[in-house]
Image: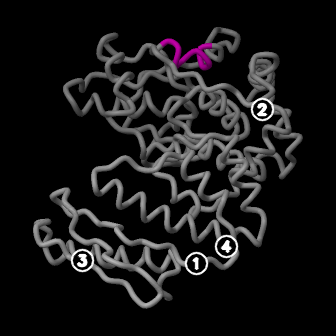
Amino acid sequence: MSKKQASYLDGLLDGNEETSAPERVRPTTLLSRGSALARVQSGEVKQVTQLELDPARVKIWSGNARHYSKLNEHNCADLLDALVAEGGQKIPAIVRRLDGDPNADYEVIAGSRRHWSISWLRKHSYPDFKFLAHVHNLDDEAAFRLADIENRSRKDVSDIERARNYLAAINKHYGGKQRRMAERLKVSEGWLSKMLKVASLPDNVLAAFSSLDDVLLKPAYELAKVYDDNERRKGIDSEAKVIALEQKALILGGQKPLTAAQVIKRLVKADGASREPRDLTGYSKYGKTGRVSLSVESCNRQGVTFRVHAGSGEDVDGLTAAFKEMIDKLKASGIIGD
């Protein structure tokens, strides 16, 4: 990256980005989605190459917080509609050139949704659409900062995803120096510290949430602080396992899963002290038809009685799977041992 480009990227952040936790913006138009990148493309960086590319020859940079695999017709619907209405892509993505990769010529630094949407439209009635991109010469640290600018306004990049992205970047780009990273990102060190703390929450705890998109920084930070207590960690791990099974049962039964606020409240209250096993009497599993297929008739230290519901229409394989899942829940609840 040239000194001029590096200087401009630094200037882009100076005085323009919040120094505390940025408020999420829910973009409503194609133009607003590209507002942050438009500043990069405003002409202050001269002689930037703009190309129309075949998206099949463009890969996604692995350093971005966004999970490309999560993109689909539903969460890209607004962009798909805008691209069709405007006859193609009007706001370029930002890419950098690749050398020595037989499968791709460029990689996307900012504009993953545009890449996915153009790729999808080319397969569905718009084969002539091209992926419009500005080519920049960026090193990994500059690419990380540029991608972070775009992600701050994205409703479909969760705080958890951004936090983990920051945790990976602090050692890779900033030598583990939190203050240096905060200076480069133009955020407060205190806010960054909270993000890094949230990133420490393990997968088994996060599995208790039906969706990470609704897990916000402040409550997640409180949970992460509690999880740091070794005496409480075991209880949180146990409760998270129970909640994860409950979430799965609710979703399979066509019911609304527990909200992020409900999950965090239960996890924060959990502790590692010995307690009476949870009474799961009445706990039910739903079959493929949406009816109850298996339920707990009674539950105590002497044993557990199950009821198989004959009218559920569930087959043997379905009942076997339901029984196994229920046993797992009973183990997690402390009713039966491993």
Upstream in sequence: badge 3 or badge 1 = 1
1 or 2: tag closer to the N-terminus: 2
Q: Residues within 10 Å of mark 4 (few under 14, many from 20)?
A: some
Q: Secondary structure at mark 4?
A: helix
The reply, left or right, for residue 285 in relation to residue 45 is left
Residue with the mark numbered 4: 234
Q: Which residue is mark 3?
A: 307
- The answer to which of marks 4 and 1 sits earlier in the sequence is 4
Badge nearest the viewer, 3 or 2: 3
Given the image, on which type of amino acid does mark 3 rest? Answer: Arg
Residue 40 image position (x, y, % from top left): 65, 17
| CA gap, disc 3 and disc 1 | 23 Å
The residue type indicated by label 1 comes to Glu
**Mark 3 residue element:** strand
Q: Nearer the viewer, residue 104 or 109?
A: 109
N-terminal label among 4 and 2: 2
Q: Is residue 99 above or below residue 277?
A: above
Residue at left offset 77%, top offset 26%: 6
Q: Give the distance between the C-alpha atoms of the residues marked 4 and 3, in whole angstroms.
A: 32 Å
Question: Gap in Å between the C-alphas at discs 1 and 2?
Answer: 48 Å
Tell me if residue 199 comes above or below residue 77 in the rendering.
Answer: below
Q: Amino acid at mark 2?
A: Leu
Location of the N terminus by quadrant is: top right
